[in-house]
Amino acid sequence: MDLLMISCTPRVKEKSNTDKILDEFKKGYELCGNTTETLYLYKRNEWEIIRKKFYENDNILFALPLYVECIPGIMAEFLETLKPKQNSNTKIGFLLQGGFVEASQLRCCESYLETLPSLLGCEYSGTLLKGGMFAVSFIGSKMRKQMTEPFYNMGKYYAQNNYFHKEVVNDFAKPEYFSKKEIFLYNVVSPVNKLFMKVFAKKLGCKVSLNNKPYQNYIKR
């Protein structure tokens, strides 16, 4: 079985959490002799090729990060260039990842993705979602392997079922919400997390305080 995978992150592959996850998913999917092809929306000069591939393939997976509760702008822009397929048996699935740990944070986007395939004249084959993936690109290879390895197993699952069944996805996506105990522990370690974020921001090139409010003077009171 062939699978066309379209990466919808605006980040280049080397700096993309989505693509590191997608690489692991791909290994699982190809385990039993299946094949994949991955295309990247950040390569805008290849959009014509990607559109052509979209119309030619009948098994498609869009992989994307959560951006402000929904899809990235670059994905929305690309979708506007597509016309619905006619008399198509194409199936479209989604791999949705985000930085927030609670799966509930991704549900709004999931609801949109559930409606999207029909607008493109296609069938919906489910959405695999997982939060807590913010640090994938910035941790060591050993820890990254631990975070992304579950997607290898889900790649095998998708190859076998050609669908992300809701009950399986919900179990994979846990926790849906933090428990009161987890919230309490988070508040306890909050100072450590803030220190980590300062170090992390400096590593990314941030030169001002994370508490800086550059647009504060423009807010009407």
Image (cartoon, helix red, strand yellow):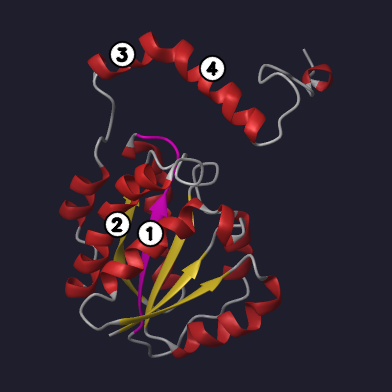
Which is more N-terminal, label 2 or label 1? 1
> With 59 as the anchor, is 208 left or right in this view?
right
Residue at screen point 24% across, 21% down: 179
In this view, the mark in front (1 or 2): 2
Residue denoted by label 3: 185
Tell me how far mark 4 sits from mark 3, CA to CA. 16 Å
Q: Are marks 1 and 2 in contact (CB under 8 Å)?
A: yes
Q: Earlier in the sequence, mark 2 or mark 3?
A: 2
The label nearer to you, 3 versus 1, is 3
User: Distance between the Cα atoms at labels 3 and 1?
Assistant: 30 Å
Residue position marked by numbered label 2 in the rendering: 151
The span shown in magenta is: 90-101
* Rendered position, 139 above or below 160: above
Report which quarter residue 160 is drawn in. Answer: bottom left
| Mark nearer the N terminus (3 vs 1) | 1
Query: In the image, residue 39 lies at what x, y percent?
Result: 53, 74
Q: Nearer the viewer, residue 76 or 97?
A: 97
Q: Which residue is mark 1?
A: 95
Amino acid on which disc 2 is placed? Phe
Q: Quadrant of the C terminus?
A: top right
Viewer can see residue 107: no
Q: Which badge, 4 or 2, is on the more N-terminal residue?
A: 2
Q: Residue 197: which quarter of the image?
A: top right
Direction from residue 203 to residue 196 in the image, left or right: left
Q: Nearer the viewer, mark 4 or mark 2?
A: 4
**Residue 215 x, y percent position in the rendering:** 79, 24
- Helix, strand or loop at disc 3? helix
Q: Give residue 141's position: percent from left, percent from top.
A: 41, 48
Of badges 1 and 4, nearer the viewer stands: 4
Residue furthest to the right in view is 217
Give the amino acid at mark 3.
Leu
Which residue is disc 4 drawn over? Answer: 195
